[in-house]
Amino acid sequence: MPAEVTVVNLSQSSPSEIEAVQAAVLRYLGTARPPDLQWNPQPLVLALLGAETAGYMGGLIGETLWGYLHVRLLAVDQSLRGRGFGRQLMESAHAEALQRGCHGVYLDTFSFQAPDFYQKLGYEIYGRLDDFPKGHCRYFLRRSLVGGEKQDLE
């Protein structure tokens, strides 16, 4: 063990240095678990690829671990909104998560983003953080992927 350890703020460092710290944190986080569980999150990345623009017009970024899909990010280009592409991304993510043996999904969103969208897809709010940012709310949602079962709130 090092004789001296110092807290260093690397927030303004190079992307490679920040990635090195993130890798170390994830490595150590992976050891803070019961010994019978392996820390092996699997990325799940879906994209909306526009034929005319030959570019990505949105997508979903998440990972699966221990029977759950965590949706970290979901976005659809403004020109495609309201046409069902967000729903398609979520349904595709649900299908892939089921293929991977998942039984639930969790995510978070803000009051000025899409809580209603997720609730229409069967998600329930299980937590909220008021005034984040000031005057708004951050919602934490979840959904079961098996047979419409409600999840325990405990």
Image (cartoon, rainbow, N blue to C red):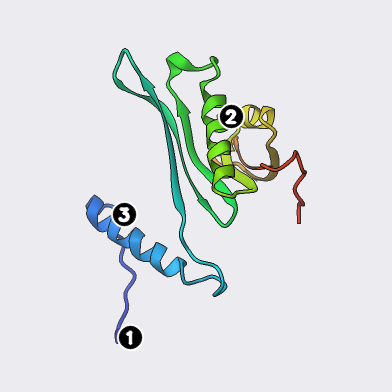
| N-terminal-most mark, 3 or 2 | 3
| CA distance for labels 3 and 2 | 29 Å
| CA distance for labels 2 and 1 | 46 Å
| N-terminal-most mark, 2 or 1 | 1
Report the side of 143 relative to 47 (left or right). Answer: right
Which label is found at residue 1?
A: 1
Looking at the figure, which quarter contains the N terminus? bottom left
Report the side of 152 relative to 25 (left or right). Answer: right
Whether pointer 2 and pointer 1 mark residues with C-beta atoms closer than 8 Å, the reply is: no
Which label is found at residue 11?
A: 3
Question: What's under tag 3, amino acid-wise?
Answer: Ser
Question: What's under tag 1, amino acid-wise?
Answer: Met
Pick the front one: 2 or 119: 119
Give the class, few, some or many, for how many residues have Cα within 10 Å of label 2's Cα (few <14, many ≥20). few
Judged from the image, the secondary structure of the residue bearing numbered disc 1 is loop
Which label is found at residue 134?
A: none
Q: Residue furthest front?
A: 99
Vertical placement of residue 11 versus 39, above or below: above
Q: Which residue is mark 2?
A: 114
Q: Position of residue 89 (x, y in %)?
A: 51, 29
Looking at the figure, which quarter contains the C terminus? bottom right
Q: Position of residue 3 (x, y in %)?
A: 29, 87
Residue at 46%, 29% (x, y): give it. Answer: 75
